[in-house]
Image: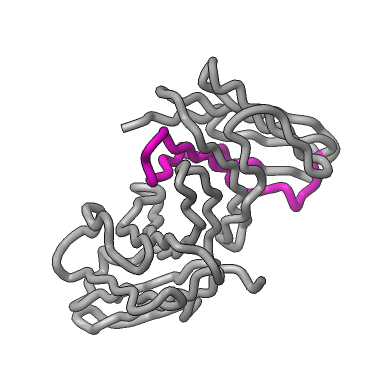
Amino acid sequence: DAGVIQSPRHEVTEMGQEVTLRCKPISGHNSLFWYRQTMMRGLELLIYFNNNVPIDDSGMPEDRFSAKMPNASFSTLKIQPSEPRDSAVYFCASSHLRADFLYEQYFGPGTRLTVT
Amino acid sequence: GIQVEQSPPDLILQEGANSTLRCNFSDSVNNLQWFHQNPWGQLINLFYIPSGTKQNGRLSATTVATERYSLLYISSSQTTDSGVYFCAVRSSNDYKLSFGAGTTVTVRA
């Protein structure tokens, strides 16, 4: 398996621009997570999908952030408009959530976002 | 939420040395993972170990769930072991992984 795939790997954009990050989870996994990592706050969970449905988006920092999962093999995280404080590494992770809640989570390589 | 504490925060090793990293957690868990974040930023799964002991090459891990801690052992360390080691746990009936702050390991040649 190719693992979790994210694109782009690096993104540099100017303040006010729209940014779209993409994720392809591991085939067969039914859960998808978006995280953000910064030096100050460490790894933060932004949103969690199960069977393509957003279950918990309480970690999304504000309305400028939105995420979609139109099908089991694709998700996007969009920031509009972007701000310098959004600069971070954004990770996508996937897992197969079993009925007994046991699962192992796998991370993609991340997208390093820089907003100038 | 569940609290995860990792120690030590930083560790400097000479190549070939052995070390032990610790992860304490504040509540019962049914999921515990160890990750290695390499200098390129990638998060690599090391162990899925809610209980018991596992070994993978020079790395091994032990989780004592009843006492709420896990240990990661690195033997005969190599420079490629450098990076940040994260412990992440999830309590029963929850989907969220709670991460510790990590242990930064630097292995010198």
- Farthest left residue? A63
Position of residue B45 in the picture relative to residue A74 (left or right): right
Residue at 47% across, 30% down: B29
* Residue A18 figure quarter: bottom left
The quadrant of the picture occupied by the N terminus of chain A is bottom right
Q: In the picture shown, does residue A38 fall above or below A9?
A: above
The image shows residue B90 at horizontal and vertical percentages of 44, 38
A2 and B58: which is toward the camera = A2
Position of residue B57 in the picture relative to residue B7 (left or right): right
- B88 is within the stretch colored magenta: yes
The image shows residue A56 at horizontal and vertical percentages of 26, 54
The image shows residue A80 at horizontal and vertical percentages of 20, 78
A79 and A57: which is toward the camera = A57
Q: In the picture shown, does residue A113 fall above or below B49?
A: below
- A7 is within the stretch colored magenta: no
Q: In the picture shown, does residue A48 fall above or below B33?
A: below
